Each structure stands twice: as structure tokens, then as C-alpha cells.
Image (cartoon, rainbow, N blue to C red):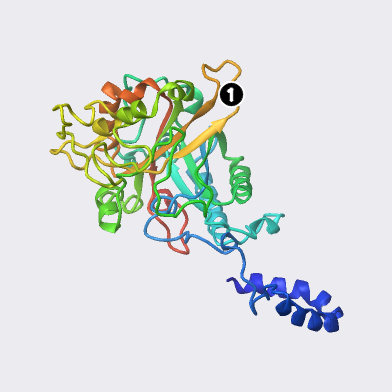
Amino acid sequence: MSSNLSRRRFLTGLGAGAGAGALGIAAAGNAGAIGLERPSDEEELPPLQTQTVEFDGEHQAGIATPSQANLWLIAFDVKDDVDRSRLRGLMRVWTQDARRMSKGHAPRTDLEPEMYDAPANLTFTLGLGEGFFTAVDREDEMPEWLGPLPEYETDQLRDEWNGGDLCLQICCDDPLMLSHAARFMIKNGAPFLDVRWVQMGFLNARGAKDPDVTPRNRFGQLDGTVNPRGEDDFDRVVWIDSGPDWLRGGSAMVVRRIEMDIDGWDILDRPSREEVVGRTLDTGAPLGKENEFDPVDLDATDEYGLPIIDRNSHVARSMPPKEFPNQRILRRVYNYDLPPEPTGRFTSNTGLVFICFQKNPMDQFHPIQERLAEADRLNEWIFHIGSAVFVIPRGTTGDEYWAQDLLED
């Protein structure tokens, strides 16, 4: 427990306690007699009031970090008159503020320091888009894969959910802390950046599920079963290990906004849903298997010799071919559920803020999405309406700011 927090609570209660000394002594004895729980010598605070995620490190926080309950994903465009020098100043301020907020400390210019009582695993992750490199005159440093993804057969992209010169992924287990932190970053960025879009998402509340349990999406599917696990797997799949200094230890971020046809999904019976997905909905096990993490066997047949898993099911189409085992990604997906749109096609406005991390999206995400767009049976109920790609700079040390190696003259 934070010593500052416990000291503050002690001092707050000191006056009242001193004025009722005799009564307090009597009450303490009575508490034991009637079975009331005595407070401990050092008050135990709610877990989220003290839980933080380290801001600095080899990699930015918010990628390998266990997914928090709430997401704000904000894309910005650089204003026309903003150059490298001004963006360098913004990165210094943003990094300093994000570092303090992640520790549960108010930024020095925040007039509402009481908002930081519960940091609740707050994380900030910076991504840079193609336009950022143009704005800072560093096109020669831009990864060759950075830019719009190819058009897929099933795309129904809308301009309001596409692109962005840079982005902030802000996640937290407390929605109020998250809202305040996002607003503070947007406010400080306003002289330099215009907000392009904001995508908010949610998962189960912290404590509702074991932290190691794979989260579910609004179709009831477990979403993220085949994610990389452990440092070696992350090194193979997620972290970039070549290129300039600012990039090594970073990653590539793909964002897809996926609208769900909940109306149509509601009509399907449970066996039909599982046939579409290729997994059981309760355990997430591949059809024909018992456990979520059992290997998928596309050659398995039933008693009549028919395939147990449809070759065009979601799990089958997303599997990497044996000759390309690197076609894997880290999914860090959130649900959204908003009021129905007046001119919308469904009675709900529901879907996924699909975020994934990998070394190279053209080698990893792209071939997977190509296969899915071609024949995934789930395509009847999902629609990709937004798309963006960002490069994630490496993590920072305590005296560095985001993308410092890229922005220094």
C-alpha cells in the first residue's frame, strides 16, 4: 500500500478520533463481543486504488500488459503548421504527463489532482501513422509496411473510422480515471493535433473473471485463445528486433473497427453458431476436442466420415499454414456497444475495436485477413468499417520521451 495514501487517511481521521477517545475504547471492546470485524493496524485499500503498471521499460506498456477493462483509442491528425520541433515539445509533455499519471500522480498542470486516487492499472501506448513521418520530415525512417492496408473483399470502410497521423491507446480498469486521463492528453495536444476519431471499448470488469481467462466478445466467443504467451513467443510474434534504435523493441499496430449483426446472430441456434466459429462457445475448445487450448485438427472426421470442423469456419480460415507458422498476431480486442444509429441497419450498434500487434502487418495480419475475407463463414455477420495502421516506438527509460531517437535533430 502506498505510504502517502495511508498517511493521508490517518491524518484525515485523527481529529475525529481524538475527540471521541473514551467512546472509541469502549466501542473497540464491544466490536469483538458482537462479532464486528476490527480494522487492521494499517488499513487495506481497494486493490485498484494502488495497482499500477510500470510506464518505462524496453517495450511500451499496454501491449503485453493484461487487458484492462476499459479502452479509449484516440487517433489524431497533425495540424498543418506543426513541425518536428513543436511535435518534439508535445512528446516531452505527453510522456512526462503519462509517466506521472501511470504512477497515480497528477501532472503538474492538472488542477484536479484528486482524480488520481485510483490509477487502476492505467497505461498509455503511443502509435505513429504515416502522416507523422511527413510532418517531422523523417520519411526515410518510416517502415515500408506503414500505410493503409490493402482493400479486402469484405471491406465496408467509412472515412470517419480510418487512418490517423498518430494515436494514443489508453487503457484502465476504472472508467472515470480513464476518461480524465484521455481528456487531459487531448487537451494538451490540442494546439498541435486535431482529433480524428475516438473508439471506446470494454471487457469484463476487473475481478469479474480470473485475469488469465480469455475475454469474450459480444457473439459470446472467447477472443484471443491463440495469442502468443511468454517472452519467447512475444519475441517471435510481437516485438520488432531490427531497424533504427527508436524502433527496436517496438511493434506494429493494426486497428479494425468491426460492426456485428447481432440481429442476425440472435436467429442462429447454438450448434449453428459453433459450426460457424469452429469452436464450442462454452469452453472455446475446437470442435471435437475438450479444452480451449487443444490443437485444432482440420482432418478429424465424425462417425460418418464428415469433417468435424468446417474448412471455412472462422478458426480454420484464421489458422496459419504449416509453411508459414509466423502468420500469428497478438489480439488485444475490446467490445463496443453504443445507442443504435438513427439510420443504422441493425437494432443495435455493436461490434469490436479490433487491435492487434505484430512485427510486420503485411507478413502477419494481411495474409490472415485475406483468407478470412475470402471465405470465412463469420463474414455473414461481421462488417469491417474502419482501418488504421501505426508503428509503436520502443519503450522509454526514466529520462526519455516517446520517439526521442526519431525526433532529435
Tell me, yes or no, if residue 149 can be seen here.
Answer: no
* Secondary structure beneath label 1: loop
Q: Quadrant of the N terminus?
A: bottom right
Q: Position of residue 319 (x, y in %)?
A: 23, 36
| Along the viewing direction, whichever of 175 and 282 lies nearer the viewer | 282
**Is 367 on the left-hand or right-hand side of 208?**
left
Q: Position of residue 384 (x, y in %)?
A: 41, 25
Residue in the picture at 51% in, 46% down: 204
Q: Position of residue 56 (x, y in %)?
A: 45, 60
**Is 122 on the left-hand or right-hand side of 117?**
left
Tell me, yes or no, if residue 36 can be seen here.
Answer: yes
**Is 218 on the left-hand or right-hand side of 378?**
right
**Extreme residue in the right direction:** 19
Q: Position of residue 335 (x, y in %)?
A: 48, 37
Residue in the picture at 31% in, 45% down: 292
Q: Is residue 226 above or below residue 165?
A: below
* Residue position for label 1: 340
Q: Quadrant of residue 153?
A: top left
| Along the viewing direction, whichever of 340 and 33 lies nearer the viewer | 33
